[in-house]
Amino acid sequence: MAALLGKKIGMTQVFQEDGRVERVTVVEAGPCHVTGIRTFDRDGYEAVQLGFGATTEKRLTRAELGHLKKADAPALRHVKEFRDEAAELQVGDTVTVEAFEKGQTVKVSGTSKGKGFQGTVKRHNFSRGPVTHGSHNVRAPGSIGASATPSRVFKGVRMAGRLGGKRVTQVGLKVHEVDAENNLLLVKGAVPGPKNGIVEIREEKAHAGRQHH
């Protein structure tokens, strides 16, 4: 199967044989333990459940420990399901970075960096107001609606608020290198989230007439 849980180590650069520099993100991916299999007949959908990130038993609940022991897996911090993946896996198997190969197109999902409460210029890329003639509207959002009619602000108006800290999926990334010995995956470009953030790596399957989703 071509799906893994991993931890974002950070970004670096790799020099090619022709002297070009490639910016890559280093991800410590796997080994992931198969902790569950979902089938269409029993569960209504097909998926494989992977566990990643060794931890101590005291950090998990008794229910979580019982579930992992059924799969003959150690105490794992993160458990995620990957839908529509290979059905030949069995509970108790281990998936490593060797599920991917150099040049393969992948998509990476993670939780973006939280940037706190931000204004409209940074959050929605608004233009600033004039800065001359005593203007007090330099970074203010401007009008958010009419006064008499409808006498309220419509839902969905772009205003200041919390930025980041949401699930983001970056598509169209290429695998630059697979280091099976150290469980490392080098992906061209940037992936969502901070250093040491947990990410989900999936093979990006081609869709006719659609590049991004």
Image (spheres, rainbow, N blue to C red):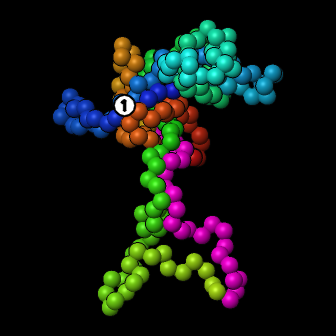
> What is the span of residues highlighted in magenta in the rendered image?
148-172
Classified by dominant secondary structure, the portion drawn in magenta counts as loop
> Which of the 4 quarters of the picture holds residue 43?
top right
201 in relation to 138, above or below: above
Taking the image as shown, residue 19 lies to the left or right of residue 171, namely: left
Residue bearing mark 1 = 9
Q: Nearer the viewer, residue 148 or 208?
A: 148
Q: Position of residue 97 (x, y in %)?
A: 45, 19
Closer to the camera in the image, 105 or 7: 7
Q: Looking at the picture, how far across and down is residue 27, in whole percent?
A: 40, 29
Q: Position of residue 124 (x, y in %)?
A: 48, 64
Q: Residue reaching furthest left?
A: 19
Which quadrant holds residue 21? top left
Residue 7: image location, x then y, percent: 44, 29
Question: Residue at point 52% right, 38% down?
Answer: 109
Q: Is residue 53 left or right of residue 177?
A: right
Q: How many marks?
A: 1
Q: Nearest the camera: 32 or 105?
A: 32
**How dense is the environment of label 1, judged by Cα within 10 Å: few (below 14), some, or many (20 and up)?**
some
